[in-house]
Structures are given as C-alpha cells and as structure tokens.
Amino acid sequence: MATFKAFDGISILPRSVADKTKPPALSALLCHARRRLAVRLWRIKFFAAYVLAISCHHRVASNLLLFTKRAFAHPWATQVTLEFRPSTPSPDDRFPIDAPVVLSVWREDKRAVVMAGYFVGRCWYVRQLQGTAGINIPKDLDWTGRFIAGCQAFVRSGGCKQVRVVRACDLIRGVNLEKGARENETVEHARERILRKLTLHYDDTAKQFGFVPVGRWTVWWHSPKKPDPQPIRAQITKYLMLKALWQDHR
C-alpha cells in the first residue's frame, strides 16, 4: 500500500485511504487538526521571513523598490510603495498578503496591484502577483510584466543573484476552490478556471522573460558574460510583442 512521509519522517496512509478506514467524525477531526497545524506553520514562516527582511535585507528591498518605480513609469500609476508586513491579513486589506515584503502600485488612494515575496540569502522569491478587484487597469500597463522586468533589472544591478517566481501548480494548492467557485460551477471547473488565470499571471509571464522551471519555482539569474541589458521600457515593449505572439499561437 502506498504511503507518504509526514512531519518527523512518520509514514502514514494517504488521506483518501485514511478516510475510508476511520469513522467520519474522526476523519473530520484529523482534517481540522491538519489545517490548523498548516496555518500555524505558515504564520511562523511568514513572521520569520519578516524578521529576516527588516534585519538583513532592508537596504536591498529599498533598491528593489527603486527598480519597480522605474518599471511603472506610467501616467496611470500614482505611486509605488514598499511595506514590511509581520502578519496577514490586515483589517485594511481587500485581499490577504502572502509574503512579508510587499511592493504596491497605487491608483490615487487605492492599492491597485501588488507583488509580495521574501529574501533568502541573495535570492528574491516572488510569492504573489495580484490585483485588486473593481479597479480597471489599462491593458498597456501589463502590470505582471512590469513587475518581472523590474525584478530582472534589480538582479542585473547586483542587488541579488537570482529571482524566483512561484508556479501556478503550487499556488492552486492553497486556493479554497469551494469559495472560489462561481454560481452553478463545479469545483473541478473552478479549479481549471483559476489554474488558467494563475498560469497566465505567473508561468506564462516568467516564461516570456526567460525564466526556467525548477521544481515549485521558475528561476532567472543574470550572467555577467551577457551584453548590457536593454532599458526597462524597451524590455517591456519587447515583452508585449512576444505576449501577443504567444497568445496567437495558443
């Protein structure tokens, strides 16, 4: 019988088999306990990444903010800000933040789009690229591409050695599909729809900027042997052309 290893190397039955061999009440209790444990572990990791960011990477994050501002040199974007969050969610958030280092692009007094991540060593991990519901973003802004272009320019400047963007197949695991399903939509159809959207935001954008899939992440690093990079604005223009060709091909 197939098994998998849980925490501390303890081998237990797969969840589908365990649910058949245990009473319903016990299965529900174990499922609830697993969820609470996962939430607490995630909060501990979140706070640890926050402490690491403010103690060791505050100056590096400020440099990342500078390149993000250059990438969003657009009349529609009012300002770009950097925040360090010790926990999530916050009462003033319209959506939860998934990582402690948060770069936000504002439209007047409203937070429009967000990139959130964390630093480990000299690597910048992008955990979240998300927009706020109800805000109409111009098509020519192409905010996911601008965030990634800013990250690449940041790495080229020597701020980090590499940037990693989480893949959609990893993000879909944390989505509550029952809440995300539309009216008269099955959970399977909701999963396919949400996965397509996540793939467009994360995987497709990273692929067109030259990222390489490595496990749960797509990775990009700068080689000093490469010629001098193009300016951010020229890089974004090139990305928009490649994106149009990519969508036509699909």
Image: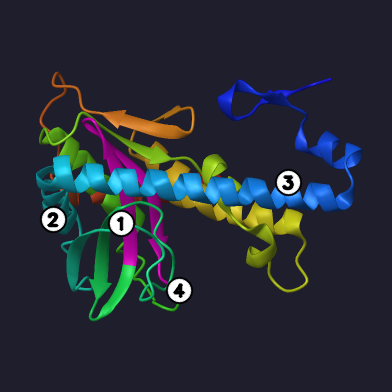
Q: Secondary structure at mark 1?
A: loop
Q: Which residue is mark 2?
A: 70
Q: Is residue 239 visible?
A: no
Q: Secondary structure at mark 4?
A: loop
What residue is shown at x 41% (from left), y 60% (from top)? 130
Q: Position of residue 13 (x, y in %)?
A: 78, 29
For the C terminus, the image quarter is top right
Front one among 136 and 37: 37
> Mark 3 to mark 2: distance in Å?
49 Å
122 drawn magenta? yes
Front one among 80 and 84: 84
Nearest-to-viewer mark from 1 and 3: 3
Which SS does the magenta portion mostly show? strand
Magenta residues (range): 113-132
Q: Which residue is mark 3?
A: 30
Q: Residues within 10 Å of mark 1 (few under 14, many from 20)?
A: some
Q: Which mark is residue 133?
A: 4
Q: Earlier in the sequence, mark 1 or mark 4?
A: 1
Task: Give the residue type that dot 1 points to.
Answer: Pro
Q: Earlier in the sequence, mark 2 or mark 4?
A: 2
